[in-house]
């Protein structure tokens, strides 16, 4: 190309995005006419006299200013610039001479991915001195110029691909080009502060909580005894940020990098290891050695750092660990996210949207058919975004789950699924609405299996139990340590016409739509369990069973009782005790409270993680032949750690040593072995393990920890205690670090 090339017509590239394979813009279709700068086309530049050629001597990314304006100033140690899409950022260029608007042009060449091309939006040119691009494109403005400096502002497309870009800068005068060859890393994140971004969140307090807050609470336990444990998300730690960028590059297809829907969905798969050698392997009971027991983790940082170093799955996690890590990943990327706990959470295995329990004619469980289950609790995530791929009204909070339970489109992932769609029973919308609906609002259906031939007529529906699944759906309150109840976001009030209509609508798209075609049976003896709350491990306790005769006639009743330890997934671990059949007579409309006593020495050696217990009662009415039964899951509470400052009157200052005392009193009448404390706190202390050996029966022990704050502001120290005999013991200490 000769010296007259500058007079030729510019090359125009038409880029179509949305509704095409590899497009990151879901449900959108955009046609863009991009004038490709001449510098991008092969050429033989014409040399200019010395002093005429425009040269860039240096580029200042203005990291401090940009990071503060883009809410990324908490990210430390990253080489390059971390910014958010759709928002202006500034550069300062040192030139060899003054910039001439009439002849000069500077082009910023942003590239992402393995084969950057304009058509796929993986290469972007943003230039000074050119015509206004208009629309949602990268735009460059000159803010200030002096004799040898130029301050420019660049605003990226609010739908731009997120991830790590490399930046090269080119200077051109007339037809001659000089390259600034020092490549810079530019990390572009989603921007919930930008109104045009799909993840835009208007409320400042929610932005602080769901994007910027690095500490949180995750709820566990059961619906009658909800409890929370502290968790360090630490999404702005250097190695955590590097790990998230690694996951983004490894797992997310380049064409999907602009869509928070596809990024969140892919990350829900990347956090578990089932399909793709992801972050965490799950294990739900048994011996965890030589790896880490799930209850031992204090936060996401140690997990993500281990995965970044080894590139192998970290062992082991359970649902709250998967959720905590996914919260970290999404907040780090700029997608507002929170961990959500569903109590009495159902696991539907056959897409029936009901939880089916089968019994033989003699009343014993037909275990061959009992694949569905109800977990004491299950923790997933919600992320905030619009859903242009769905009808209006289904944006906002979306359920997404990293715990591997069932496959979705052949991969272990769940969501994002519109919470509004779940509430209304619109289970035909993507992604995985059927599964999530069953988790929060599936009815429990009891079936009698009359034979082993497996004919449809041999499955007799006995009873539909409403309002058991999906209780006290919980997350941390914004700006507080309180529990926020989300139940009415997921379903209408239990028993209301709207709630029943949603259930029947959803079930119509399931594998057993005929479930609600059969009228309910009428039973006149009822039973309920009265679990005593706040029973601590090591104590004796009682379980009262209330049996009521609601008929106007006498009833002869027999009941059988069994108590087992169980995992939080509802799976039975060990039998603790059974008792002989109790038989009694109830007069018309009479009730009786039957008491079962449990001594600590009956259960202490049989407990498993989460100190969960499952009580089962099966009864029979002689006069009517009615069989009834119920099971109730509950847990024994563990004590908290006491965490306090040794010198509370001293000033708590940045860079100054703080001494903290951790105290623990064993509630058990036996020795605790292999005791250890795990401690971490963003800006206070990197994840630290302290081996403590043995704690004698009922003994009190304490440890002193020195902390050197490296960041000012409100910070939280999180501690867990583990031993062979006792786990899920936690504590925390909030500190306000002054400069």
Image (spheres, rainbow, N blue to C red):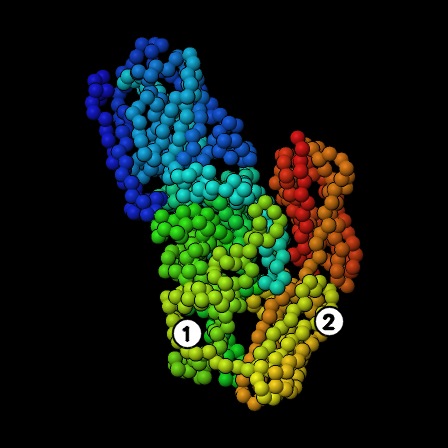
Q: Position of residue 557 (x, y in %)?
A: 61, 85
The image quadrant where one finds the N terminus is top left
Q: Position of residue 70 (x, y in %)?
A: 48, 33
Image disc number at residue 599: 2
Q: Which is in the foreground here, disc 1 or disc 2?
A: 1
Indicate left or right for 702 with 85 as reference. Answer: right
- Mark 2, residues whose alpha carbon is within 10 Å: few (<14), some, or many (≥20)? few
The image quadrant where one finds the C terminus is top right
Q: Is residue 239 visible?
A: no
Q: How many marks?
A: 2
**Image quadrant where residue 208 sits:** top right
Secondary element type, mark 1: helix
Image disc number at residue 317: none
* Residue drawn at the location 42% of the way across and 60% of the way down: 424
Farthest residue to the bottom: give it.
623
Task: Give the spatial CA distance, label 1 vs label 2.
Answer: 42 Å
Secondary element type, mark 2: loop
Q: Nearer the viewer, residue 661 or 3?
A: 661
* Residue drawn at the location 60% of the way across and 77% of the way down: 527
Q: Identify the mark nearer the N-term, 1 or 2.
A: 1
Farthest residue to the top: give it.
50
Indicate left or right for 525 with 638 as reference. Answer: left
Q: Position of residue 331 (x, y in %)?
A: 50, 43
Q: Is residue 201 visible?
A: yes
Please say if 355 is above or below 167. Answer: below
Image disc number at residue 515: 1
Please say if 285 is above or below 51. Answer: below
Q: Nearer the viewer, residue 623 or 690?
A: 623
Q: Nearer the viewer, residue 701 or 457?
A: 457
- Mark 1, residues whose alpha carbon is within 10 Å: few (<14), some, or many (≥20)? some
């Amino acid at each position: 190309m000769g010296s007259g090339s500058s007079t030729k017509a510019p090359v125009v590239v038409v880029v179509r995005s949305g509704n095409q394979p590899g497009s990151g813009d879901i449900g959108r279709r955009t046609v863009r006419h991009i004038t490709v700068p001449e510098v991008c086309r092969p050429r033989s530049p014409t040399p200019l006299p010395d002093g005429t050629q425009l040269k860039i001597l240096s580029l200042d990314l203005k990291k401090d200013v940009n990071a503060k304006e883009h809410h990324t100033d908490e990210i430390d140690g990253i080489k390059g610039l971390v910014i958010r899409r759709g928002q202006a950022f500034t550069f300062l260029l040192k030139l060899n001479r003054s910039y001439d608007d009439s002849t000069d042009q500077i082009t910023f060449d942003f590239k992402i991915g393995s084969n950057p091309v304009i058509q796929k939006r993986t290469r972007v040119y943003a230039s000074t001195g050119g015509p206004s691009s208009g629309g949602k494109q990268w735009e460059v403005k000159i803010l200030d110029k002096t004799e040898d400096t130029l301050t420019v502002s660049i605003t990226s497309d609010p739908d731009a691909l997120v991830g790590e870009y490399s930046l090269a800068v080119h200077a051109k005068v007339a037809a001659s080009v000089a390259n600034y060859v020092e490549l810079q890393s530019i990390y572009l994140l989603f921007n919930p502060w930008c109104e045009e971004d799909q993840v835009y969140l208007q409320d400042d307090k929610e932005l602080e909580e769901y994007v910027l807050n690095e500490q949180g609470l995750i709820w566990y336990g059961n619906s009658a005894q909800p409890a929370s444990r502290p968790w360090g998300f630490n999404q702005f730690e250097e190695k955590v940020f590097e790990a998230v960028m690694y996951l983004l590059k490894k797992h997310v297809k380049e064409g999907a990098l602009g869509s928070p829907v596809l990024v969140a969905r892919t990350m829900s798969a990347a956090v578990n290891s089932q399909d793709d050698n992801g972050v965490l392997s799950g294990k739900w009971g048994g011996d965890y050695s030589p790896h880490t027991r799930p209850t031992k983790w204090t936060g996401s940082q140690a997990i993500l750092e281990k995965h970044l170093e080894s590139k192998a799955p970290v062992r082991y996690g359970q649902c709250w660990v998967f959720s905590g890590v996914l919260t970290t990943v999404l907040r780090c990327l700029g997608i507002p996210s929170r961990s959500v706990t569903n109590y009495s959470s159902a696991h539907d295995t056959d897409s029936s949207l009901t939880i089916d329990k089968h019994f033989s004619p003699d009343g014993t469980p037909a275990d061959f058919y009992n694949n569905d289950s109800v977990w004491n609790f299950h923790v997933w995530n919600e992320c905030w975004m619009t859903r242009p791929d769905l009808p209006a009204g289904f944006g906002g909070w979306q359920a997404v789950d990293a715990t591997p339970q069932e496959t979705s489109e052949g991969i272990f992932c769940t969501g994002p699924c519109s919470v509004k769609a779940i509430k209304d029973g619109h289970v035909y919308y993507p992604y995985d609405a059927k599964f999530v609906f069953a988790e929060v609002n599936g009815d429990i259906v009891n079936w009698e299996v009359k034979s082993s031939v497996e004919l449809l007529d041999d499955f007799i529906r006995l009873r539909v139990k409403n309002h058991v699944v999906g209780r006290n759906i919980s997350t941390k309150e914004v700006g507080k340590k309180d529990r926020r109840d989300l139940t009415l976001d997921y379903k209408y009030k239990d028993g209301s016409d709207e709630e029943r209509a949603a259930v029947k609508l959803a079930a119509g798209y399931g594998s057993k739509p005929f479930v609600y075609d059969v009228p309910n049976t009428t039973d006149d003896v009822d039973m309920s369990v009265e679990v005593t709350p706040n029973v601590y491990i090591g104590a004796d306790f009682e379980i009262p069973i209330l049996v009521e005769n609601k008929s106007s006639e006498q009833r002869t009743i027999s009941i059988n009782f069994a108590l087992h330890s169980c995992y939080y997934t509802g799976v039975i671990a060990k039998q603790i005790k059974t008792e002989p059949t109790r038989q009694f007579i109830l007069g018309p409309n009479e009730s009786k409270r039957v008491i079962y006593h449990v001594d600590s020495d009956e259960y202490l050696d049989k407990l498993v993680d989460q100190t969960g217990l499952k009580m089962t009662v099966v009864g029979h009415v002689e006069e009517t032949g009615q069989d009834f039964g119920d099971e109730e899951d509950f847990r024994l509470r563990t004590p908290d750690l006491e965490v306090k400052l040794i010198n509370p009157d001293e000033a708590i200052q940045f860079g100054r040593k703080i001494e903290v005392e951790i105290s623990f009193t064993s509630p058990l009448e036996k020795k605790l072995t292999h005791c250890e404390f795990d401690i971490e706190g963003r800006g206070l202390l990197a994840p630290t393990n302290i081996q403590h050996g043995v704690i004698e029966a009922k003994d009190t022990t304490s440890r002193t920890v020195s902390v050197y704050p490296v960041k000012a502001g409100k910070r939280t120290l999180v501690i867990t205690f583990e031993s062979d005999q006792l786990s899920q013991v936690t504590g925390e200490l909030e500190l306000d670090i002054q400069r």
